[in-house]
Amino acid sequence: MAPWFPNLVVQLPDQFLLLFIIILLFLCSSTTCFTISGQAEALVKWKDSLDMNPTTHSLLRSWNLNSTVSTSHHLYNNNPCTWVGITCNGYGSVINITLESSNLKGSIPVSIGNLSKLTELDLGSLPPEMNNLTNLEELLLSNNFLYGYLPENICLGGRLKKIAVSYHYFTCSIPKSMRNCNSVVRVLLGVNEFTGNMSEDFGIYPNLVYMELGNNKFFGKLTRNWGHCQKLTMLNISNNKVSGMLPPELGKATQLQKLDLSSNLLVGKIPKELGQLRLLYILKLNNNTLSGNVPAQIGMLFDLQQLDLADNKLGGPFPKHLEQCANLENLNFRSNRFSGAVPFQIGNFHSLRNVDLSRNMLIGDLPPELGNLFLLETLNLSITIS
Ligand SMILES: *[C@@H]1O[C@H](CO)[C@@H](O)[C@H](O)[C@H]1NC(C)=O
Ligand SMILES: *[C@@H]1O[C@H](CO)[C@@H](O)[C@H](O)[C@H]1NC(C)=O
Ligand SMILES: *[C@@H]1O[C@H](CO)[C@@H](O)[C@H](O)[C@H]1NC(C)=O
Ligand SMILES: *[C@@H]1O[C@H](CO)[C@@H](O)[C@H](O)[C@H]1NC(C)=O
Ligand SMILES: *[C@@H]1O[C@H](CO)[C@@H](O)[C@H](O)[C@H]1NC(C)=O
Ligand SMILES: *[C@@H]1O[C@H](CO)[C@@H](O)[C@H](O)[C@H]1NC(C)=O
Ligand SMILES: *[C@@H]1O[C@H](CO)[C@@H](O)[C@H](O)[C@H]1NC(C)=O
Ligand SMILES: *[C@@H]1O[C@H](CO)[C@@H](O)[C@H](O)[C@H]1NC(C)=O
């Protein structure tokens, strides 16, 4: 079994009185669990990684490797089973860590390195008490053994900045509190089975820098709200069921560097306003049902390196204005309705490496200027030229 680490990072803001309960169930047999001293060390390591304050300091006083520690009420030793908040099974393995505290801040329990010796960790689903963590700033779940629902109230307190969930495990609606989550900066929910209506469940995110929703089941339309994301550098909603037209307001998210809306159900034209995204270097709109011409303004994307418009219903003459995109390396127009001849200006696309013009209605002779494309590696013209 490959070693893995549960990675449940929960940052609690100061000055908020929170009852904080995390239940870890370590299912293990007597032979596969780590040793008692290993557990103790691991727990102390975790404790040391926490930002301690007087309250947590006294709460976790018993978490100590000294052979015995006595307080006015208790006698503890380096068997963690006797420590505050720890429950062990019959084999002396920690099965339950329960901490109730105000002001606990830190990582749980990534620093417990010895967990790698366990054969199984079952968190079942996130404990329902997570729903009360309305003031989280970061929720990072990258644990292959987590299932279920994200805490609904995750952003009720308006403090959430980062939410990241590992691949494959979440099959649910996006938490409703995401809609008003103005504080959010980074959202990484790619490759799960999240569902949600793009126009209802997402709001206005002035601080958003990174949004990765690819390979889920989001549906509904993109709203003009995306134009208010003035800090957004990456928007990836590829491979969902997003429908409707591309909102022209997307052109106001001028920090965008990567825009991937491929493999959705988008229709209508490519808005000319996308030409305002001067920092864009990846634009993927392939595998939708977009129609119309490639607007001349796309030629203003001077940093563009990858333009993938394959598998749409785009038409008109080959968009020669793209010659201004001096950094364009990968150009994919496969399976569209471009017609006419390949213009001689293609010889000015000096950075081109991979070009796929297959399955269009282009006709005529290839311009000799193609010979100027010294970096060209592949050029697919299959079923293009009659
Ligand atoms: C695991 O515990 C052992 C003691 O049993 C200790 O030597 C080792 O450093 C621990 N490993 C980690 C990654 O914490
Ligand atoms: C107990 O451990 C603390 C650090 O955790 C150390 O400062 C102290 O000297 C130790 N006491 C004994 C009796 O070993
Ligand atoms: C863990 O401890 C808490 C508090 O003592 C308790 O409510 C919960 O039932 C325990 N869970 C397990 C699996 O023992
Ligand atoms: C969590 O919130 C619910 C109300 O939503 C409340 O009934 C419950 O007592 C809270 N639980 C804790 C552990 O604070
Ligand atoms: C968008 O997300 C999907 C799924 O996670 C990924 O395969 C794809 O490479 C991403 N696109 C970009 C441009 O990073
Ligand atoms: C998504 O939400 C919008 C706005 O409330 C609504 O008009 C639309 O019908 C919803 N789409 C779906 C597929 O439910
Ligand atoms: C196109 O998108 C559909 C879903 O809309 C997906 O099933 C299919 O695999 C995609 N095709 C390609 C070539 O990416
Ligand atoms: C060229 O394009 C055709 C049609 O899209 C495709 O079937 C073929 O595999 C492509 N050839 C190469 C070498 O990629």
Image (cartoon, grey):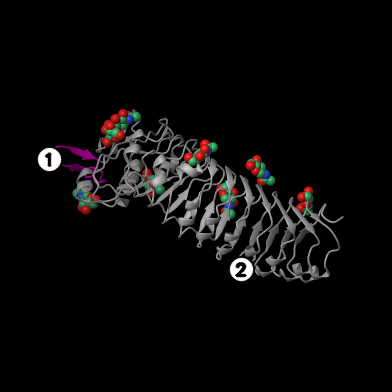
Q: Position of residue 110 (x, y in %)?
A: 39, 47
The type of residue carrying mark 2 is Phe
Q: Which residue is mark 2?
A: 302
**Main SS of residues in magenta:** loop
Image location (x, y in percent) of residue 312: 69, 49
**Residue at the spot 27% in from the left edge and 39% down from the top edge:** 99
Residues tagged 1 and 2 counted as in contact (Cβ below 8 A):
no
Decide: is 26 above or below 190. Answer: above
Mark 2 residue crowding within 10 angstroms, few (<14) / some (14–19) / many (20+): many
Q: State left or right for residue 1 relative to residue 283.
A: left
Image quadrant where one finds the C terminus:
bottom right
- Image check: 116 left or right of 242? left
Q: Let me know if residue 92 is in the magenta part.
A: no
Q: 347 or 274: nearer the eye?
A: 274
Would residue 195 be seen by someone viewing this image from the given angle?
no
Q: Position of residue 33 (x, y in %)?
A: 41, 35
**Is residue 73 in the magenta section?**
yes
> In this rendering, would 183 be left or right of 66?
right
- For badge 1, the amino acid type reads Ser
Do we see residue 383 in this rendering? yes
For label 1, the residue is 72
Mark found first going from the N terminus, 1 or 2: 1
Magenta-colored span: 60-77
Depth check, front residue: 81 or 344: 344
- Residue at 23% x, 40% y: name it: 77
- Choose mark 1 or mark 2, whichever is in front: 2
